[in-house]
Image (cartoon, rainbow, N blue to C red):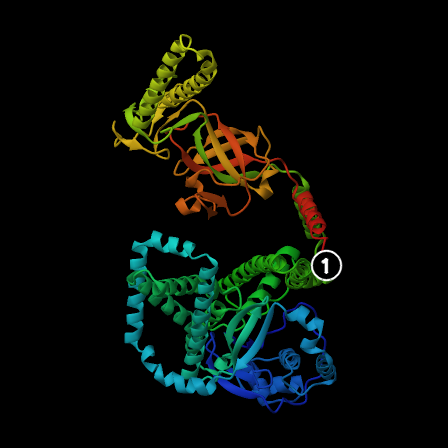
Amino acid sequence: MSANAAAAPAATNEAPAKELPLPQALRQDLRLFDSGSGNDGGPTWAIQDPASNRFFRIGWLEYECLLRWPGKPEEIAADIEASTPLIVDAEQVSDFARFLDLHQLALPSGETRQRVQKQAREPGWRHWKWWLHHYLFIRVPLIRPQRFLEKLTPALEPLFSPLAFYLLLAASLLGLILAARQWEHFTHSVLDSLTPTGILGFVLALIVSKTLHELGHAVVATRLGVRVAHMGVAFLVMWPMLYTDTGESWRLRSHRQRLAISIAGVSVEMALAGLATLAWALLDDGALRQAALYLATTGWVLSLALNVSPFMRFDGYFILSDLLDFPNLHERAGAQARIWLRRKLLGLNDPWPEDFAQKTRRSLIAFALTTWLYRLIVFLGIALMVYFFFFKALGIFLMLVELVWFIARPAWSELAVWKKRWPEVQMRRRQIIYGTLAGAFLLAAIPWPFAVETYGVSHAERQQLVFAPFPAELVALRQGGAVAAGEPLAGFTTPDLLARQSQVAASSEALERRLAGLLELDGGVNKQLALTQRLDEQRTELRGIAEETGRLAIHAEFAGQWRDVSPLLRPGTWLGVREALGVLVDPQSWVVDAYVEQRLVDRIEPGARASFLPQGGVQALAGEVLEVDGTRSPRLPHPMLDSRHGGYFNTQPDGREATPSEALYRVRIRLRDTPSEIREMRGSVRISGTPRSLVWEGIKGSLATLVRESGF
């Protein structure tokens, strides 16, 4: 939603304002509306600029100035003091004059006329400079929906009744309760939908959800008598998103009405998500249930994660601004935070831009600092997204523009003010600032042994998994417990192998008898060679059968604990080669197979200290790194680490194996202590990394990126 509004703020004291001649008259096309009362109880008005469809909120003082415009500041101030209870000086009138001139609300003076003419001569969207400055956010109006909305709004009037609200609320709560009862099925359905077809379904659901979202803004605005100028598509870093221009909502006297317009989009989207959740819980598997899953997921996730945030100029910001009846929240909070920084860091005694109670001022400063940090993270994320989603040359260029224009430029503007005011800073405070900066650089330059944190599975270093050597009948199975080396663990038999052994043995005996009688017959010597060869073949086959028969008896390869024996297995049961009978483990030696991302693996060396904390445990087990694989793991051998089984790593199914979604390298760690439970356990791993300097790592990473991407 777009709400173009501004207040008439006092001077921010960033630099002495240049004296401007007062405009001779206001523009004749401006409109003035009564906006009710402000937070302090005083009356407020809104100035509409039809040319730009922007609204400027002013207070009692500014309104009295408009009534006496034009004139000299001293005369206007004196007349206001004589006619009203307000105490005014000429500087306040001059500040308001500068505000009018800055926003082109008055007939232009010489300097303002030059600025307007310069802006008019700019090439606009046909020039590369326009795209350089506007590629982050571009709005394209598509329709003027006022007539359609005036016909649609009366038909939707029943949806604004209390009964409809309570029915929607009950349906949403019921859907959430039913979905929570089958939460694992819901989450697995979402993960299983991450296919090309599923992603297309999510995109279509997003289009439907966002269309209804914007329609909610437009319908509520029309219902409250606000004209919707246009609706269209906005491009956020080339990503399309719908928008609705409800800027005229600032004509409304009640901030509760403006709040209703601001919250309408999120309300519609969450109502749609609630109904879709209920539909998913009640429907049988099929196309309709899958469509409900798409609508529910996009509605809940995007409404709560994106739209509700007040730190960007999305719905959350306007909701908070209307809820507090505090227009220009970002700008006014930022002005307070800048003055606070100058007071605290530089020791300057600049006046506050606006007078607020101490509690309100602290809240505004905290909100501004949080907003700056949030935007820093978001803009860095957008820069990386631009870098990875566009081809190399354009990606690097747009990433640099993003970093310079939206992060470095605002910081540099404030630092320029600090530089200009630096002579006013006391010498002792300068020394503290220089010392702090030097100390921070020194700390960043010193190599520090940062730890590498990841996840892994602990298991016995020596273990013997027992399976049937081939499909066979179980004849004996040892019960679990301590086992000495060489003791039998399981025995099998197979009638086919026994029959084959008897057949080959009988054939061998027959050949031996024939060989014994050949010497007494004429020509027997000639047949002896052929029969001897056949006899050797039978004896070789008999030895092979004996070896196969020997595999039917499985013995312990080492002394240890025989565990995980199924109580359901009984002699006479036929088993396949994939059904485990048990596992023999050596409880004296334990290792951990940890898996580390590619960007971190070069920080780990054999012999480094490590620790393993089992999931749900309270005491970490000490250990040391044995080896680090030089190649990435082609598969994830431990299913308990797979996110599909509650693990930590995302995988992609590849036949019967799971392939990690990102490059992972195995790091084997030997534990010095024995776990309390003799079983495989997953948990978190902490490994002491080689010392690294943040400064050097940053320089090396930047150079590596330039070298890697130099082949455009």
Residue 95 location (% of width, % of height): 64, 78
Disc 1 secondary structure class? helix
Q: Is residue 89 visible?
A: yes
Residue 533 location (% of width, % of height): 46, 18
Q: Is residue 86 visible?
A: no
Q: Relative to residue 502, is residue 254 depicted above or below? A: below
Q: Relative to residue 525, is residue 158 depicted above or below? A: below
Q: Outermost residue toward the bottom? A: 28
- Say left or right for 559 vs 595: left
How many marks are shown on the rendered structure? 1
- Say left or right for 558 vs 567: right
The C terminus appears in which quarter of the rendering? bottom right
602, 389: nearer the viewer:
389
Q: Outermost residue toward the front? A: 522
Q: Amino acid at mark 1?
A: Trp
The residue pinned by badge 1 equals 422
Q: Relative to residue 118, is residue 575 depicted above or below? A: above
**Callout 1: 10 Å neighbours few (<14), some, many (20+)?**
some
Q: Outermost residue toward the top? A: 520
Quarter occupied by residue 519: top left
Residue 419 location (% of width, % of height): 72, 60
662, 135: nearer the viewer:
662
422, 392: nearer the viewer:
392
Residue 603 location (% of width, % of height): 61, 37
